[in-house]
């Protein structure tokens, strides 16, 4: 068991994991900042926090949401196709120039000048989009400009992640080169500018989409906005298993809550039979939602395999299976949230 505090573990909400020598298990150590410096009680912090609400859109609004998500995907795929075309054209011209006797540096410079700059950044992608949008997408005015900017921003982030991964600046598993998005993939769109606010406890307003009703109360965010403790920075709409959600990215000034046992340190060992085993001897039961929905998922998978591609029955069965998977994911997510909340407040 690891029982010391290092410099990294002194910050609130941070965690460290160590693998001791001899092949022992990895143990997660959670500490709190106030346990180290008691004089920091009642500290107000400005943090970035997301507030997620389920939307209850009308048929017209649902169609507009799908249109914005499709516009974001279109801009992403267009930018990636443009980038690949210029890279391929530059490579072909370099080979052609070298075959005619040019040096490698001269061939590279001539090819770059002939094909034009490769849009690697968000700024260059937006510049190319503004030049070509009237020709390639004359219908672009039907959606908010943020929809297209969202797709280009996603592409720029993917490219930056790819190069950071190759250069060793990004930790974790290797990140591959961006690939094209298909229509059946994840639908989402991000709004960074425009009218983004919570109207009341059951309505939100988004650019070009207008006022949209929510299925749940938004008082968790609206009360803090009215009190001046929160400021909305962005909004992201996303479809999951036929349901639309909006996530508000906010800057929140909140009070640092104190744990019940402020000086306690607990070790957490993630397991298979149990979700987690604490160093205090407490065992956290692992949720088993798959066993509850296993028969239904197996039946829907068989129906999906037998259904003809492109048929309405296949679309309905696929939607039912997606809702089943979403329920399983929600049960697991709920268990993890309850566990982390329990560790943070005790």
Image (cartoon, grey):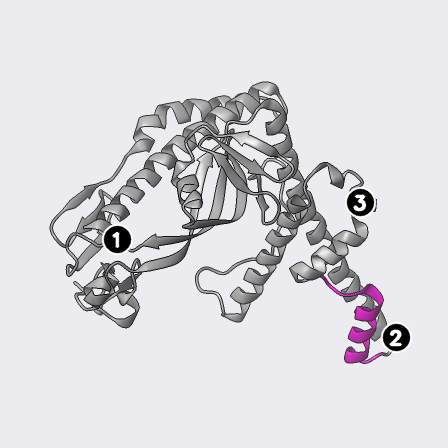
Taking the spot 70% from the left edge, 57% from the top edge, the residue there is: 125
Residue underneath mark 3: 136
Q: Give the range drawn in magenta.
A: 102-119
Q: Position of residue 314 (x, y in %)?
A: 56, 23
Residue underneath mark 1: 257
Taking the spot 28% from the left edge, 62% from the top edge, the residue there is: 17
- Mark sitting earlier along the chain (1/3): 3
Quadrant, the N terminus: bottom left
Q: Nearer the viewer, mark 2 or mark 3?
A: 3
Q: In this view, does 15 lie to the left or right of 126?
A: left
Q: Is residue 213 left or right of residue 268?
A: right
**Residue occupying the far top of the picture:** 313
Q: Where is residue 211 in the image (x, y as percent from the top left)?
A: 57, 32
Examine the residues drawn in magenta and state their main secondary structure.
Answer: helix
Q: Where is residue 296 in the image (x, y as percent from the top left)?
A: 39, 23
Which image quarter: residue 201?
A: top left
Q: Residue 100 carries which label?
A: 2
């Amino acid at each position: 068991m690891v029982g010391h505090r290092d410099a990294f573990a002194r910050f609130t909400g941070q965690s460290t994991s160590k693998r001791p020598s001899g092949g022992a298990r990895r143990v997660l150590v959670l500490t709190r900042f106030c346990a180290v410096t008691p004089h920091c009680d009642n500290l107000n912090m400005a943090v970035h926090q997301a507030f997620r609400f389920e939307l209850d859109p009308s048929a017209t609004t649902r169609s507009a949401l799908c249109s914005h998500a499709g516009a974001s995907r279109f801009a992403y795929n267009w930018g990636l196709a443009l980038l690949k075309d210029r890279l391929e054209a530059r490579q072909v011209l370099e080979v052609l120039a070298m075959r005619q006797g040019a040096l490698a540096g001269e061939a590279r410079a001539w090819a770059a000048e002939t094909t034009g700059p490769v849009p690697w950044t968000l700024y260059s992608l937006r510049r190319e989009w503004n030049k070509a949008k009237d020709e390639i997408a004359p219908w672009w005015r039907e959606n908010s400009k943020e929809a297209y900017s969202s797709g280009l921003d996603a592409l720029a982030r993917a490219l930056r992640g790819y190069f950071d991964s190759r250069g060793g600046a990004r930790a974790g598993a290797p990140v591959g080169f961006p690939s094209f998005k298909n229509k059946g993939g994840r639908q989402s769109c991000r709004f960074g500018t425009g009218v983004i606010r919570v109207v009341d406890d059951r309505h939100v307003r988004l650019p070009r989409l207008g006022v949209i009703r929510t299925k749940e109360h938004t008082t968790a965010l609206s009360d803090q906005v009215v009190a001046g403790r929160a400021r909305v920075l962005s909004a992201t709409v996303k479809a999951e298993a036929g349901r639309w959600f909006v996530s508000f990215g906010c800057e929140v000034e909140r009070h640092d809550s104190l744990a019940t046992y402020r000086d306690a340190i607990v070790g957490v060992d993630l397991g298979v039979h149990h979700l987690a085993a604490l160093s205090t001897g407490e065992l956290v039961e692992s949720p088993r939602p798959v066993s509850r929905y296993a028969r239904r998922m197996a039946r829907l998978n068989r129906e999906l395999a037998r259904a003809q591609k492109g048929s309405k029955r296949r679309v309905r069965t696929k939607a039912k299976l997606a809702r089943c998977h979403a329920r399983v994911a929600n049960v697991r997510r709920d268990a993890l949230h309850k566990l982390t909340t329990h560790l943070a407040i005790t």
